[in-house]
Image: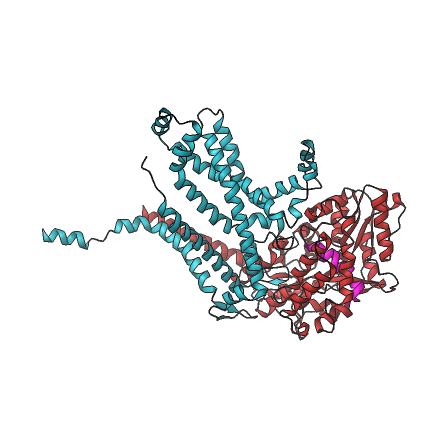
Chain colours: A cyan, B red
Amino acid sequence: MSNSNNTIKSQFPWHILFFLAPGLLIYLCISVYPLIDTLWLGFFQEDSIGKRTFAGLDNYRTLLFDAVWSEPFWNALWNNTKFFLIHMLVQNPIGLFLAALLSSPKLRFSNSYRTLIFMPTMLSVVIIGFVWQLLLSPLWGISENLLYAIGLGDFFDSWLGKETSALITLALISVWQFVGIPMMLIYAALLGIPDDLTDASVVDGSNPWQTFWHIKLPLIFPTIGMVSILTFVANFNAFELIYAVKGAVAGPNFSTDIMGTLFYRTFFGFQLQEGSTTMGAAVATLMFLIILIGVAIYLFLVQRRMQRFQL
Amino acid sequence: MKKTLTRKLATLSLSILAATASAQALSANKLVIESWRNDDTKIWNDIIIPAFNKQHPDIEVVFSPTPPSDYNSALSAKLQGGTAGDLITCRPFDVSLSLYTKGHLESLNDIEGMDNFSDVAKSAWITDDGKNSFCLPMASVIHGFIYNKEIFKELGINAPKTESEFFTALETIKNESRYVPLVMGTSDQWEAATMGFQNIGPNYWKGEEGRKGLISGSEKISDPQYVKVWEHLSKWGPYMGRGYEAQKYADSQNLFTLGRGAIYPAGSWDIPTFNDQADFEFGAFFPPTPDGQDTCYISDHTDIAMGINKSSTNKAAAKTFLSWMTTQDFAELYSNQLPGFFSLANHKVEIKDPVAREFMSWRSKCKQTIRNSYQILSRGTPSMENDLWNVSSQVLNGKMTAEEAAKQVQHGLSQWYKPQQ
């Protein structure tokens, strides 16, 4: 008895390690190692001949408290927050709305709609940027004529070029592109709700509105939470659309500058501005921390209190 | 099963190694050129490299460009990783200087034919103490205005020479036709600084005098001569096309070549594009001088050069190529194949393109200078060049006054540049 116990104890579960190893190795090499190296690099400074010296928290001190760096940093962070809020307020409600419509059994051609709405998500951001620039262009765009046709011509403006509207316009373009993702996730969650529950509520006398509001919505809260956190992470990592449309000096007057473009200018440099690997690493680390804090807040304040129902 | 896979992998990697090794052995005399001029690929492959091979058939040259906006970052990554080509096309001033100080570029003092270049031509690719040249000057670009000759004829306007003539012309075009008087946008921002500020500016800050004054600290960018440049720019807005705030560089090029605009603030590098696309005759005039000023100043900007990668295995061949680039043959070939890029060598070059010849002729009429933000002044944070992009486009958008623009750039400079503190 004791003997057999011993053999069980001494036997290391090699098979688990074996099956984990490929994924773990890839993850360690291309995700964990670069991340740690970036965090580490942020503590260094580089002189003109490329020699690195340890500088402790100097980069962060400069970035957060020296006006030359901190002003662009806070500006980018604030713009990024606006970019995120627009996504939360527009993209996710629309996604939810579309998902609710799609899951309605009375809707015909729902598969076609689903595919069409999801299409832009699969296109390259560069194409999206280019197409929307053309659509909105005051020179060649069709949006002006379209607005005149419905009597709103006077509202047309070169939205992408104005300090007050450029960021909002870009955020809405991004919403248009990515609205398919929350739609799909929420749609899947809605399909997962057993018919018994909705049927029961109908028998109890609730109208469709009440059924959605009191039966379905609470059941898909976990999915909406996940969608929110995905939006948060994606928005604070956003870069391509702004770069494709407005370039790295995200104008006018840095009104479309977000963390991604700030990082690009710092790390790679721009035109005559020389790139700094170490300062860039510091910016990247701050981006990482911001996302980490955001996710942590969500995890501790929202996720843990969320009620889950066994369906 | 596992063993065979490993063996297969091993053979595969061995054969790849062997292949690369043999490729290297074959290419003992192969030169790879790194460049951002992807527009010029055809001309390099069809004309320039064959011309070189006529004299040096034993050296194989490959032109391998990267898109302009990625060039700086891609190049420095390649140089650090040791995979960059043998010949490196050099951006002017600090970007290349830093490559040299980091030990990526070879010193070129002993290149045969280096004395074919003036000190001004070499100034963009030399160490601060003036002792070591690290890139061979190739070409400069000149700023000015390109105009649609047919529209000017139709409206009876002559190419303006002074500022008031310039604005009268714009006013006429605006009032008497439906053409866009001034074709430029501010969406990409760099045109505002490069084709706006650096184009008309030298007339106000007296070219080199002002540029050197800024570097030495005897002048400030908030001085009246600089404020006047932005004041001039602030008057452009009403003549620019509708929605110019969202107009991009390619939009402007299209608008002009479609014949919908009259005057285009230009760099001479636009000439080949316009030759290809415009089916009307166009001409050029130099930046109008302020009224009552006789001397004109133009921006004749040292823009492009070529250096040798320090870790190249083919330095001898690379030096042969660079020496060939100092000759009259190359100067003529380059200036004529790429009208708008003017050879920086001292050779007398006959330029065939009429508009390019017009640009070139200003060199003898006007005093030359280079863009004032390029030497030293964009080294720190904030970079003066980025500041100029931002404030110049805001002035054009009517969101900022000339004084505010000047104050902001001066404030930026005073943050890090000692002579301006």
Q: Is residue B293 above or below residue A159?
A: below
**Where does the image place residue B135, in percent across and percent down from the top left?**
66, 66
- Decide whether the magenta segment is chiefly helix, strand or loop: helix
Which quadrant, please, contains the C terminus of chain B? bottom right
Q: Which quarter of the figure has residue A35? A: bottom left
Q: Which quarter of the figure has residue B243? A: top right
Residue at (42%, 32%) from the top-left corner?
A212
Q: Is residue A75 visible?
A: yes
**Where does the image place residue A142, in percent across and percent down from the top left?**
67, 36
| Horizontal side of residue A16 vs B389, given as left or right | left
Query: Is A167 or B7 nearer to us in this picture?
Result: A167
Q: Which residues are magenta?
A: B188-207
Q: Is residue B45 visible?
A: no
Query: Is B113 or A112 nearer to us in this picture?
Result: A112
Q: Is residue A97 above or below residue B421?
A: above
Q: Is residue B195 magenta?
A: yes
Q: Which quarter of the figure has residue B400? A: bottom right
**Where does the image place residue A126, in percent across and percent down from the top left?**
58, 45
Which quadrant, please, contains the N terminus of chain B? top left
| Horizontal side of residue B228 vs A269, given as left or right | right
**Where does the image place residue A72, in percent across and percent down from the top left?**
58, 59
| Horizontal side of residue A284 vs B133, given as left or right | left
| Horizontal side of residue A238 vs B362, given as left or right | left
Q: Is residue B110 above or below residue A159?
A: below
Query: Is A281 or B8 nearer to us in this picture?
Result: A281
